């Protein structure tokens, strides 16, 4: 297989830990916890569940009023992360960019807009479904809005592979750079909480959805609902790399993940019991595995948060420079992303 | 030639849609110009749709939520494609096989019945959501055939199927996998249908791509898959090569959330990328399988761009025979393009009667012989993504 290393040139993040790199580093230092709640209907009335929530309003400074009004929350989250990453990389976003590829990973897509559209379908006996809500309900709406705001005319891709979305999307980002389709890729993961998702979480997991998250509790469900966005600015690793490099991206089936004690192991474990056995085995084969999910919660794009967190932890001197981030799914698949990060501040 | 050396062999194709439940049946229907329109009641109106023949759907197809039915169609088309490729379970086990599937409905958590119960405060059972979580199309195909390579469900709206094939080809070129099953899948879904009705881009009559009086699209359903294989894998098992994918372009309009750029800039870039990768000139292209949905805006863009970029090259849309199958369209039309290269003829653009004075392009009105080895298929998506595939037929 042809390996092509990618350079991480910028990072943009927003999650339950707050907005931006410093907020994420602070949370990594202090330990994470849910910053909000969601209310779900139960047989005994409304119940509050802890959740990792994002305030997307700071994105307003990046777009015009018209664009802001036309955009759904899912796209606003994406734009918030993307613009921060672009600023961090020093990439000019005022010029049309046909050499920029957009790759977005999302487990559930624009879930709130999907149900908002259904509301308009159901109201008034279905006489006036909203075309705006429909346009915004597709998974690719985040990429479309990003493309319009950034005037990015290059290739675009939205991947929806649940918790394996980031590794699958990263495979494509690497191919685009390897084949020279683009010079730069804006790679991101976006997921939003909506009332239906919260309700389902409660129905699936009951009291266990109340946390607290313990990614190393192998015999019980401890996941807490999360939402957020991560974007990475990627180029081929041919010169300087602001944060370090993505050295290998691999999709591995049925336990063929080789343990490498020379690299820190970042487990994608996020308290979901369905994958606990696989993570337990990986953890047992490594001297000091870590899991960052208590900082951002449980969400399909978690592995992208792991990459950002690991890069920033290395930068802050609180994490190893060489890491491998592993995410599992319920089908015994493993998303493996190996990185080497810079250990000193810019 | 360079592009032949870099091309990715297609060793199998599979398809089911309103035009036929197998490649063989679809081929016959396409060249007979047989339109299988059915009428779907929504509210007080009946709408033309292109539905699978209920008598030839996969087992269990009519059960469960739409997303799961999407996966079942993908499994059926993938099964036909793998059989066509001669890839038995034993051969598949010895290869690293990836799956890349485009869809819209298959990734959408839009179960209407569940949501009606939810907003009525009746605390619905979450089984439909559990099924949604188990219905990822790429995962369903991989699990059905025990495939161990990477999985990717592409959610690029109507270009998803073409994008899935283009991206899977790069996996083969870089050695990520030896074989990839790639294409698209989608089913008719009331929620999506209501969305297109709200946009007022559906035709109340059977659709008329490129016709002056066209009023919009008709929805369809189906799945189309190709088996892409590394040259070494295909050569090792002496697999017959149906065609080679020699070019792929993917570019964005960056213009509007639901309307195409009237100047077709994104589509032009995608065409240019695909031709550049294939190391071909426009004159090398024997025909174009156009997206041609029948919406006024889409057909105007293609009707202007293709005659400019490809003067004298015949083009046509097959949406008048399959309907617009959304995320499946690129997969189904990749299979059609390969069939046309083999047959050295293209089907009539069914539904077209009257030239549109707004653009110079006129699609083929009858089954038309072609002369050449290269066919181009394009997909244009909601939200502005454009994808173009160029296939080379068998060596003469």
Image (cartoon, grey):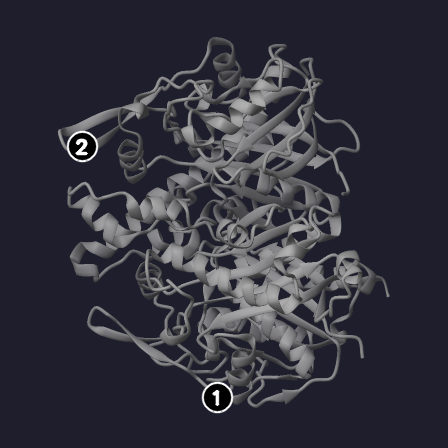
Read off the chain for label 2.
Answer: A
* Residue A39 percent coordinates (x, y): 24, 29
Q: Quadrant of the N terminus of chain B?
A: bottom right
Whether labels 2 and 1 belong to a single chain: the reply is no
Quick one: SS at disc 2?
Answer: strand
Q: Residues within 10 Å of mark 2 (few under 14, many from 20)?
A: some
Quick one: SS at disc 1?
Answer: loop
For residue B238, which quarter of the picture? Answer: bottom right
Tag of residue B354: 1
Whether A149 is drawn above or below A276: the answer is below
Kindly identify the residue that appears in the image at 52 percent across and 73 percent down. B292
Whether A170 is drawn above or below A286: the answer is below
Q: Is residue A62 visible?
A: no
User: Which residue is more in the foreground, A80 or A175?
Assistant: A175
For residue B284, which quarter of the picture? Answer: bottom right
* Residue B128 percent coordinates (x, y): 30, 48
Q: Tell whether B89 sits left or right of A127.
A: right
Kindly identify the residue that appears in the image at 61 percent across and 63 percent down. B82
* Residue A338 percent coordinates (x, y): 67, 28
* Residue B49 percent coordinates (x, y): 36, 74
Q: Residues within 10 Å of mark 1 (few under 14, many from 20)?
A: few
Q: Quadrant of the C terminus of chain B?
A: bottom right
Q: Is residue B130 visible?
A: yes
Q: Nearer the viewer, mark 2 or mark 1?
A: 2
Residue at image mark 2: A42
Kindly identify the residue that appears in the image at 76 percent across and 43 percent down. A1
Labelled pair 2, 1 in contact (Cβ < 8 Å): no
Estimate the spatial distance between the alpha carbons at disc 2 and disc 1, rounded to whole Å. 59 Å
Kindly identify the residue that appears in the image at 40 percent across and 65 percent down. B59
């Amino acid at each position: 297989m042809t390996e092509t290393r990618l350079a991480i040139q910028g990072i943009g993040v927003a999650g339950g830990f707050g907005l931006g790199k410093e907020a994420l580093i602070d949370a990594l230092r202090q330990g994470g916890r849910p910053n909000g709640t969601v209310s779900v209907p139960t047989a005994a009335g409304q119940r509050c569940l802890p959740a990792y929530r994002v305030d997307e309003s700071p994105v307003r400074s990046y777009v015009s009023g018209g664009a802001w009004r036309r955009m759904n929350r899912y796209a606003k989250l994406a734009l918030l992360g993307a613009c921060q990453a672009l600023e961090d990389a020093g990439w000019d976003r005022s010029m049309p960019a046909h050499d920029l590829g957009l790759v977005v990973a999302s487990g559930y897509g624009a879930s709130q807009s999907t149900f908002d559209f259904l509301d308009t379908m159901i109201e008034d006996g279905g006489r006036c479904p909203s075309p705006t809500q429909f346009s915004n309900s597709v998974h690719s709406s985040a990429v479309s809005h990003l493309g319009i705001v950034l005037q990015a005319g290059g290739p675009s891709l939205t991947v929806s592979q649940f918790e394996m979305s980031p590794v699958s999307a990263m495979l494509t980002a690497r191919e685009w750079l390897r084949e020279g389709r683009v010079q730069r890729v804006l790679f991101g993961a976006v997921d939003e909480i909506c009332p239906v998702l919260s309700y389902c979480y409660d129905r699936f997991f009951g009291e266990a959805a109340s946390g607290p998250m313990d990614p190393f509790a192998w015999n019980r469900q401890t996941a807490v609902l999360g939402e957020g966005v991560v974007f990475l600015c990627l180029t081929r690793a041919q010169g300087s790399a602001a944060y370090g490099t993505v050295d290998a991206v691999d999709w591995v089936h049925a336990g063929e993940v080789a343990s490498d004690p020379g690299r820190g192991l970042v487990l994608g474990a996020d308290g979901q019991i369905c994958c606990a056995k696989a993570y337990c085995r990986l953890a047992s084969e490594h001297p000091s595995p870590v899991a960052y999910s208590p900082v951002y919660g449980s969400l399909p794009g978690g592995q992208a948060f792991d990459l950002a967190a690991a890069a920033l932890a290395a930068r802050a001197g609180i994490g190893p420079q060489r890491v491998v981030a592993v995410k599992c799914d319920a089908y015994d698949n493993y998303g493996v992303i190996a990185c080497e990060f810079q250990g000193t501040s810019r | 030639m360079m592009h032949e050396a870099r091309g990715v062999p297609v060793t199998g194709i599979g398809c089911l849609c309103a035009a036929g439940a197998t490649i063989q049946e679809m081929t016959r229907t396409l060249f007979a110009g047989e339109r299988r329109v059915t009428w779907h009641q929504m509210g007080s109106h009946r709408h033309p749709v292109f539905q699978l023949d209920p008598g030839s759907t996969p087992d269990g197809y009519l059960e469960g939520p739409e997303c799961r039915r999407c996966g079942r169609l993908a499994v059926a088309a993938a099964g036909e494609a793998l059989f066509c490729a001669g890839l038995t379970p034993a051969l598949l086990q010895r290869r690293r096989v990836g799956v890349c599937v485009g869809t819209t409905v298959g990734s959408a958590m839009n179960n209407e019945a569940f949501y009606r119960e939810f907003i009525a405060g009746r605390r619905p059972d979450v089984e439909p959501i559990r099924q949604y979580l188990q219905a990822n199309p790429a995962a369903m195909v991989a699990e059905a055939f025990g495939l161990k390579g990477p999985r990717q469900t592409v959610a690029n709206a109507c270009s998803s199927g073409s994008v899935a094939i283009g991206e899977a080809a790069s996996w083969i070129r870089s050695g990520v996998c030896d074989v990839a099953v790639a294409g698209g899948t989608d089913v008719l879904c009331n929620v999506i249908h209501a969305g297109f009705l709200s946009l007022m881009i559906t035709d109340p009559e059977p659709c008329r791509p490129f016709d002056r009086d066209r009023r919009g699209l008709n929805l369809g359903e189906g799945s189309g898959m190709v088996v892409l294989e590394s040259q070494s894998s295909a050569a090792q098992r002496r697999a017959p090569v149906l065609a080679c994918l020699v070019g792929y372009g993917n570019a964005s309009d960056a213009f509007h959330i639901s309307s195409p750029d009237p100047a077709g800039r994104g589509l032009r870039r995608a065409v240019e990328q695909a031709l550049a990768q294939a190391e071909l000139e426009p004159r090398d292209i024997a025909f174009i399988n156009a997206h041609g949905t029948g919406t006024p805006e889409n057909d105007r863009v293609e009707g202007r761009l293709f005659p400019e970029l490809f003067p004298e090259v015949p083009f046509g849309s097959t949406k008048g025979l399959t309907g617009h199958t959304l995320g499946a369209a690129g997969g189904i039309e990749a299979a059609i393009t390969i069939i046309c290269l083999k047959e050295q003829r293209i089907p009539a653009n069914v539904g077209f009667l009257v030239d549109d004075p707004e653009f110079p392009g006129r699609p083929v009105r009858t089954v038309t012989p072609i002369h050449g080895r290269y066919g181009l298929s394009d997909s244009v998506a909601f939200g502005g993504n454009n994808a173009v595939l160029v296939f080379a037929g068998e060596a003469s």
